[in-house]
């Protein structure tokens, strides 16, 4: 049902926000929940002899979830909340006795307490009466669709309880974590840079050792060849092994002398035992 111009002016003057097509993905609180992915509906049957009364509720507050959504034929295309009451007498067709609908122009409120979501809609016209609605969502990740578990109407206020995935926080989300995700990405980039730097340093040091060993071996081979030129291969091999052994055994003494000079200490030991290859 549509708000008249006088009531719209009242809402604007009261400071209450109007829905005007609620964009859940842009709302600071609603974007954290899966409200924009599901339509909530539920039906209750009650024996009212001699009749049977059926009440159906349909809830879809987010404009993002309008395409290919099945809406009860008695409801309007702009409805975000619609309730239909039908009565069936014996041997007769069901008869619609009551339709309550809240369209996208009503005022709304959002409340989140301990990750529990509650929506309120205010000022829907129902005949000559204004009615409000309060919808409490309860998260249940084990359900594939929402279920309206409780409904009542007292003092022109409709109270609904909805259980299902709509009331659950989005996996990535809590959109509270958007900034945290950005910070995490920055930290990852820094860690990757540090990792690349450390890996680059390790690689440079490794190549330095490899080149040093390679040039040492080449040097030993050249010296061994020059000293055994004109001799046999066995002579060359023996010369190479001897010089390599001499070089390896002299490394500790050479290292001590270098360390002593670096740290400014005087060593009583002489450099005998070390000779250039």
Image (cartoon, helix red, strand yellow):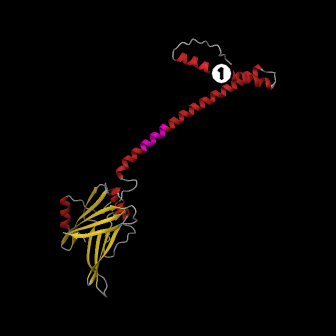
Residue 275 image position (x, y, % from top left): 66, 16
| Quadrant for the N terminus in the image | bottom left
Report the front residue among 111 and 72.
111
Tell whether 243 sits left or right of 182. Answer: right
Q: Is residue 254 visible?
A: yes
Is residue 110 positioned above or below 233 on the image? Answer: below
Report the front residue among 273 and 146.
273
Residue marked by disc 1: 249
Question: Callout 1 environment at 10 Å: few (<14), some (14 to 19), or many (20+)?
Answer: few
What is the quadrant of residue 81 in the picture? bottom left
Q: Is residue 79 visible?
A: no
The residue lying at 76 percent from left, 25 percent from top is: 237
Residue 202 image position (x, y, % from top left): 55, 33
Residue 72 image position (x, y, % from top left): 34, 74
Report the front residue among 146 and 99.
146
Residue 111 image position (x, y, % from top left): 27, 57
The rendered magenta stretch, by its main secondary structure, is classed as: helix
Tell whether 209 sits left or right of 139. Answer: right
Is residue 173 positioned above or below 19 on the image? Answer: above
| Quadrant for the C terminus in the image | top right
The residue lying at 42 percent from left, 42 percent from top is: 186
State the extent of the magenta-drawn residues as a range: 185-194
What is the quadrant of residue 255 in the picture? top right
């Amino acid at each position: 049902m549509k708000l008249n111009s006088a009531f719209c002016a009242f809402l604007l003057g009261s400071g209450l926000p109007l829905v005007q097509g609620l964009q859940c993905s842009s709302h600071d609180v609603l974007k954290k929940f899966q409200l924009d992915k599901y339509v909530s509906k539920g039906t209750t049957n009650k024996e009212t002899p001699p009749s049977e009364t059926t009440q159906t509720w349909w809830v879809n507050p987010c404009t993002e979830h309008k395409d290919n959504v099945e809406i009860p034929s008695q409801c309007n295309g702009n409805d975000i909340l619609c309730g239909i009451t039908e009565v069936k007498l014996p041997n007769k067709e069901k008869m619609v006795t009551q339709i309550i609908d809240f369209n996208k122009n009503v005022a709304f409120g959002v409340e989140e307490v301990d990750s529990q979501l509650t929506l309120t809609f205010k000022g829907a016209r129902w005949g000559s009466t204004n009615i409000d609605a309060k919808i409490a969502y309860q998260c249940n990740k084990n359900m594939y669709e929402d279920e309206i578990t409780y409904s009542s109407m007292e003092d022109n206020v409709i109270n609904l309880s909805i259980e299902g995935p709509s009331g659950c926080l989005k996996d990535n989300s809590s959109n509270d974590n958007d900034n945290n995700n950005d910070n995490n990405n920055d930290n990852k980039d820094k860690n990757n840079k540090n990792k690349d730097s450390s890996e680059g340093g390790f690689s440079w040091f490794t190549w330095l050792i490899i080149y040093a060993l390679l040039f040492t071996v080449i040097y030993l081979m050249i010296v061994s060849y020059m000293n055994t030129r004109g001799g046999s291969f066995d002579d060359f091999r023996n010369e190479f092994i001897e010089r390599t052994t001499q070089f390896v055994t002299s490394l500790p003494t050479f290292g001590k002398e270098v360390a002593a000079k670096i740290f400014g200490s005087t060593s009583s030991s002489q450099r005998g035992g070390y000779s250039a290859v």
